[in-house]
Image: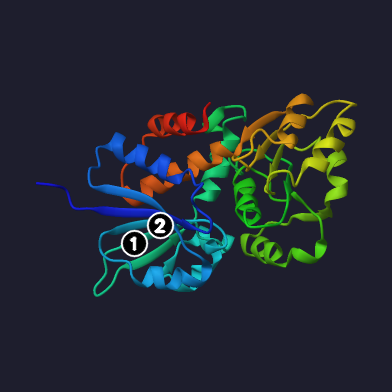
């Protein structure tokens, strides 16, 4: 007898470029989950409520891209504590309810950032948490991914990072998220970043491809005296390596590409949606084949 269809999807606009189907489908195949489907569905913020309202019992979960990570919040029955303080939901679990599905919001971006950075830290994935070690950190940008990055850095022992932005007039949302988390970042203009990030333990660039090209050009001069010592995670994975990643590596720093964050957040999504331990190696292999690495 054929297994019942179980459905999941990544939603966004645009979303055709998403690597999420590659990762989730590889996981389903490795786990032997026949009948499980994962698609990319183009949904705008204005159409999200209708899509959510039409979910039927065959659905198990949704992956969300921005700006849907915030748009979805009032549509959920429950929001997990981490997603609540971060203010962003990238994972919706669709659970059986009485008359309609119960929607639970979660955030696996934080997990993905932590796991990606840990790959380059002493001790690897067993690297210490905030309780074990204190680290310095910096975040480039105050956009959608910055609040998840604040939470991730706090888990890695950095509760007072510096956030570099083009304008101090656009940090209100991030300031509120930081207050909910109990972390105390310092905010500075991006034109000061190059000379300061060279001494940071952890640096995360959350800006789009090419948005940090100017910083990359300045980094060579700032690092000339003694190079860089920390780990850079550049969340961009479409245009890789970025100019910033190349400049950081040339100065002697360790670099983690955005595809590693993407992999690890998907690993946690698979666990939450299927209730099974995700097959990391199978997912990693599929991602590498898709990216040609």
Residue placed at 65% from the left, 60% from the top?
182
Q: Nearer the viewer, residue 66 or 130?
A: 66
Q: Earlier in the sequence, mark 1 or mark 2?
A: 2
Say whether marks 1 and 2 touch (CB < 8 Å).
yes
Q: Does residue 95 appear anywhere in the picture?
A: yes
Residue placed at 37% from the left, 45% from the top?
271
Residue bearing the label numbered 2: 62
Q: Nearer the viewer, residue 195 or 81?
A: 195
Q: CA distance from mark 1 to mark 2?
A: 8 Å
Q: How is the image coloured?
A: rainbow
**What is the residue that sits farthest to the left in this orientation?**
1
Q: Nearer the viewer, residue 35 or 73?
A: 35
Q: Position of residue 243 (x, y in %)?
A: 74, 35
Residue bearing the label numbered 1: 94
Q: Secondary structure at mark 1?
A: strand
Residue placed at 35% from the left, 41% from the top?
25
Mark in front: 1 vs 2: 2
Residue 23: quarter of image = top left
Q: How many marks?
A: 2
Q: Residues within 10 Å of mark 1 (few under 14, many from 20)?
A: many
């Amino acid at each position: 007898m054929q297994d019942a269809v179980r459905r999941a999807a990544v939603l966004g606009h645009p979303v055709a470029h998403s690597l999420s189907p590659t990762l989730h489908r590889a996981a389903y195949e490795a786990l032997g989950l026949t009948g499980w489907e994962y698609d990319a569905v183009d949904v705008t913020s204005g159409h999200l409520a209708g899509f959510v309202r039409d979910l039927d019992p065959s659905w198990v979960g949704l992956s969300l891209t921005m700006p849907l990570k915030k748009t979805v919040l009032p549509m959920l029955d429950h929001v997990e504590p981490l997603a609540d303080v971060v203010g962003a939901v990238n994972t919706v679990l669709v659970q059986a309810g009485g008359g309609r599905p119960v929607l639970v919001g979660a955030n696996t971006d934080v997990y993905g950032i932590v796991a990606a950075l840990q790959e380059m830290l002493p001790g690897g994935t067993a690297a210490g948490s905030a309780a074990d070690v204190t680290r310095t950190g910096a975040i480039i940008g105050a956009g959608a991914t910055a609040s998840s990055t604040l939470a991730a850095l706090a888990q890695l022992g950095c509760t007072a990072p510096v956030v570099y932005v083009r304008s101090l007039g656009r940090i209100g949302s991030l300031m509120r998220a930081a207050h909910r988390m109990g972390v105390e970042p310092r905010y500075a203009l991006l034109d000061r970043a190059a000379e300061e990030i060279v001494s940071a333990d952890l640096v995360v660039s959350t800006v789009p491809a090419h948005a940090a090209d100017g910083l990359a050009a300045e980094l060579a001069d700032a690092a000339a005296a003694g190079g860089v010592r920390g780990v850079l995670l550049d969340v961009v994975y479409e245009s890789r390596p970025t100019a910033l990643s190349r400049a950081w590596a040339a100065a002697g720093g360790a670099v983690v590409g955005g595809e590693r964050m993407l992999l690890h957040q998907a690993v946690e999504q698979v666990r939450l949606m299927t209730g099974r331990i995700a097959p990391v190696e199978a997912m990693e292999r599929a991602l590498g084949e898709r990216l040609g690495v």
